[in-house]
Image: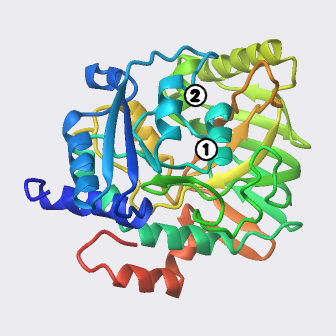
Amino acid sequence: MSSIPEPAATAVADLLDECARLGPGQEVLIVAYRDGLRGGDNLVDEQAIAWIEAGVMERDASPTVLWADEHSTVHHWRFPPIVKAAMAASDVMINNTLDLSFEELIEFKRFTWDEKNLMVRNFATTASLLSTDWVLTPHRLVNEIRYRAATLIQPGATFRLTDANGTHLEGRVLPAYHPDHPWFTGYAVTREECGYYRPWPEWMHPPIYIQGTSGTFVFDRMLSWWSRYLDISPYFDEPIRLTIDDNRIVGIEGGDEAKALRRFLASMEERTGKRADNLDALHFGVHPNAGVTEEECPSILYRRLIEHAHTSNIHAHIGVPELTPHYPYWVHITGDIRTATFEIGETLMHDGGHLTVLDHPAVRAVAAEYPGRPGV
């Protein structure tokens, strides 16, 4: 580890000690997809993986690096059997791939839950990313932000979401429990309390399930995991405007991006035999420094993935069909907005894009414990 630049060494320590919480003697599987070395979607470089491997060894744990050759195909994504077998033999898996997504791949999600294998999803997969303010923000601080925000969510309360872009939604908050995500027994739960998935850097508050929601939702970007399958950029030339009536999408207006969304949702209904016209959840990023420059990360897919986690970023789940045995993926295309005002009951969650718990004394106290590190 002495050969690693100081910022990257600090980042790797945060990943392994604060997030993964590695202990001596543990078997640690480090997975990356080889296409990411050649300009594929699974961005990675050998230097970052080598630094993580060295950090694992320094903690007297045993690392195994698995470079998998996996070529993802739309609607036929896989949890590769070789990765599953290696994960079953490990205590901790550090996942450095875009396509091996806990959120979307139901088989992967259920395996992690059933086998109680800790999966740490590392988003900082290159040497350059391991020295950014996004990564150097203390994991403990971002977790504190996530938890404090969660304590403000009130099931049964009405909500109001507005934005100068024309967004205006109103509805009611449902309890956190969802049959497809049983680990969320409530909104105010830590990652350690709710299962075996820990993203690093931390990125999302638990989904806020909503009912009786009507109004308009206008957005000009989406999470890049799905934009590539709609064959559009994650940043739009023209915003999409959704008209919502009781959680159903009754209108989709806009330019080429709106046409692509209509086509994709129609294809989902044909593929699954289930309706794909709902808007049933909202949630938001919890990282105050989630953003990198083009110089730090040339990949537009990854820059949008990182920005998605920013505290100002609120997103809605669009057109999520019910799960079927023949389509084991949780399709949740997102619409993202960045300058919204979000109220739940009498509580102001976001004020013009500012997440109000960033000003909470407990959040400020944790930030003060890390002088010289990026904070709030």
Q: Is residue 3 left or right of residue 118?
A: left
Q: Which one is nearer the viewer's eye here, 28 or 104?
A: 28
**Helix, strand or loop status at disc 2:** helix
Amino acid beneath label 2: Trp
309 relative to 256 in the view: left or right? left
* Residues packed near mark 1 inside 10 Å, few (<14), some (14 to 19) or many (20 plus): many
The x, y position of residue 187, in whole percent, is: 72, 65
| Residue drawn at point x = 27 percent, y = 71 percent | 373
| Residue depicted at 66% across the width and 32% down the height | 107
The image quadrant of residue 272 is top right
Nearest the camera: 147 or 81? 81
Which residue in the structure is indicated by mark 2?
226
Residue 101 appears anywhere in the view: yes
Q: Residues within 10 Å of mark 2 (few under 14, many from 20)?
A: some
**Residue 298 image point, x, y percent:** 28, 33
User: Residue at (57%, 22%) from the top-left corner?
Assistant: 78
Q: Amino acid at mark 1?
A: Thr
Which mark sits nearer the N-terminus, 2 or 1? 1
Q: Which residue is mark 1?
A: 112
Q: Are marks 2 and 1 in contact (CB under 8 Å)?
A: no
Query: Looking at the image, which residue is at 43% across and 59% down?
Result: 20
Q: Quadrant of the C terminus?
A: bottom left
> Residue 132 at what x, y percent from top left?
26, 54
Please say which color scheme the image uses.
rainbow
CA distance separating discs 2 and 1:
22 Å
